[in-house]
Amino acid sequence: MTQIQNQDTDLPDIPKAPNPVGQTLQMLWNDKFAFVSVVFLLIVVLCALFGPLLLEDVATKQNLRGRNAPPFDFSASWPYWLGGDALGRPLLARIIVAAQNTIFVAAGAVFFSLIIGTALGLVAGYTTKTWSQVIMRLADIIMAFPSLLLAVIVLFMLDSSVFNLVIVLAITRIPVYLRTARAETLEVRERMFVQAAQVMGASTRRIIFRHILPVVFPTLVTIATLDFAFVMLAESALSFLGIGIQPPEITWGLMVSLGRPYLTTAWGLSLWPGLAIILTTLSLNLVSNWMRTALDPAQRWRLENVRKQNG
Amino acid sequence: MLNFLGKRAVASAISLVGLVLLVFFLSRLTGDPTGLYLPLDASEEARNQFREIHGLNDPLIVQFFSYMADLIRFDFGDSIRRSEPAIDVVMRGFAWTLQLTFVTMSLVVVFAVIFGSLAAFNVGGVFDRIATFFSLIGASAPDFWIAIVAIVIFSVKLGWFPTSGTGTVWHWVMPVSVLFIRPFGLILQIVRGAMITALGSAYVKTARAKGIKNRPIIFVHALRNALLPVITVIGDQAAALLNGAVVIESIFGFPGVGKLMIDSILQRDFTVVMAAIMVTAMAIFVMNLLIDILYSILDPRIRY
């Protein structure tokens, strides 16, 4: 019935307001690179969540006949498709299990540095000059403090664990958010709505968290998505140097490092985990590039235009 | 200008003192070096003597003040590992790192400025694609992994370059190329962005209307204005390299300050760690200052 009614009226078709989730998915589908990246990241997240549960036994079972087994031997069982490591443990299964630590460390570090850095930056930007100076000098010191030394100190004092590595990486990344949050706050605090809130007698805490934070936060989240890839690389570098995650825990960076002595005989030991790192960080970068355009109302039309041309 | 210099120097000095304090006490928390340097079956007397020689027997606070008293006379103490003045060890490593940074950053700046300008001139063209590719790779690939793969391909399989050391020009090729990638990708993007803005401005249109050729327009008219934001990023990247490209230096056995730092930290050679941190911090301070001065030369509107 509705169709007939539509034909009867001479009014031009008014497109229905598209549902926002569907529209975003459509925009994602149109950018093939971003789409593939999102799919890949989803796979990585699934591996991180369920890999250790399902494959822990397979990944730690030693098999001396499979020592440094060559990759692409499809007659073997599937965990051995990328070959075996120096103790004959299946490489593919180990990469899947290692995804958990790798992702957890990066996510944890980004989360904590984002929260702490933003809080300090807001305070530094909004309060008195003295506090601001103290916080900024603190940021300078953190920036100049060698992260390697910090990692060794934590490793020595607190034992090696995934959570301690998260602390180390979080501390080193705090200044990034702190500086950005402060710079933005300095600008936002001069705007009319903040003055209005002050005049109406809002408390400092309310102004910071209810009025300034929502304006500053999107920028910080954008930085955080980019930072996720950076932190992943930093973690793998620390693990590579032997002052990050310690065996028997594994991350991709540690696997690259463990494969280094066998470079000439079994190059795959370092190559595959490294490739896993690259593909993940590459996807993260592509997705965050896409997100910057898609989530920014001022730029969103670029992607929507593409949709119209294609449709 | 002098006022500005003074303010900067005071702020840096405060941070430096804080850093020295923090590093001194925190690094002492990582344990006693005695066990690392003496044989396992060394007697208690020998251990005590070792601690006595290196001043590790005093209470921490006494150690700190005697260290600071020496520091005021520019005496950084002796390295435990090499038993020579720590500052000599550090300066030797720093000289290598300085050369590595200089070579890498010069190449990066030259190539990034040329490629970035051309990419901006023809958005979507060949150079633009090269730019996008390199910045993605630079931001995504772990440098130690690239280094390892490069060693397997170019040293082991093809035998073109030596795997480590600093003897000849050939030794420098691989470390420099691996270090080149990340800052190149980053600076390329910045140059491209700044150049697109500059090329769209009115004075470029005027220059074009006067019949000036493309090349002078890009490299003379637009570039000078586009350089300002670029210089900040160049400074950041150079600072990162000056701090010691720890991973790359250790993979390629490059005797720079980064390798020295990680070795000294692992060997609990506290005096060298402290000296290395102070020297690199000073170098970065000087470099940031130079960049600020360069800013006011390039843009006469900026005055301090």
Image: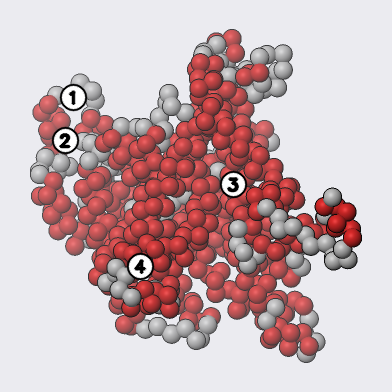
Q: Position of residue B205 (x, y in %)?
A: 74, 84
Observer-side mark, 4 or 3, equals 4
Q: Nearer the viewer, residue A94 or A63?
A: A94
Observer-side mark, 4 or 2, equals 4
Q: Position of residue B212 (x, y in %)?
A: 77, 85
Secondary structure at numbered mark 2 = helix
Q: Distance from label 1 to label 3 (Cα)?
A: 53 Å
Q: Check if mark 2's residue and mark 3's residue have beta carbons within 8 Å.
A: no
Q: Report the residue at 44% width, 39% height from top.
A: A105
Q: Which residue is mark 4?
A: A207
Observer-side mark, 1 or 3, equals 3
Asked if marks 2 and 1 fall on the same chain, the answer is: yes
Disc 1 marks a residue whose amino acid type is Ala
Q: Check if mark 2's residue and mark 1's residue have beta carbons within 8 Å.
A: yes
Judged left or right of residue A38, residue A134 is left
Disc 3 marks a residue whose amino acid type is Leu
Q: Distance from label 4 to label 3 (Cα)?
A: 34 Å
- Confirm whether residue A144 shows in the render: no
Q: Which mark is residue B42?
A: 1
Q: Which residue is mark 2?
A: B50
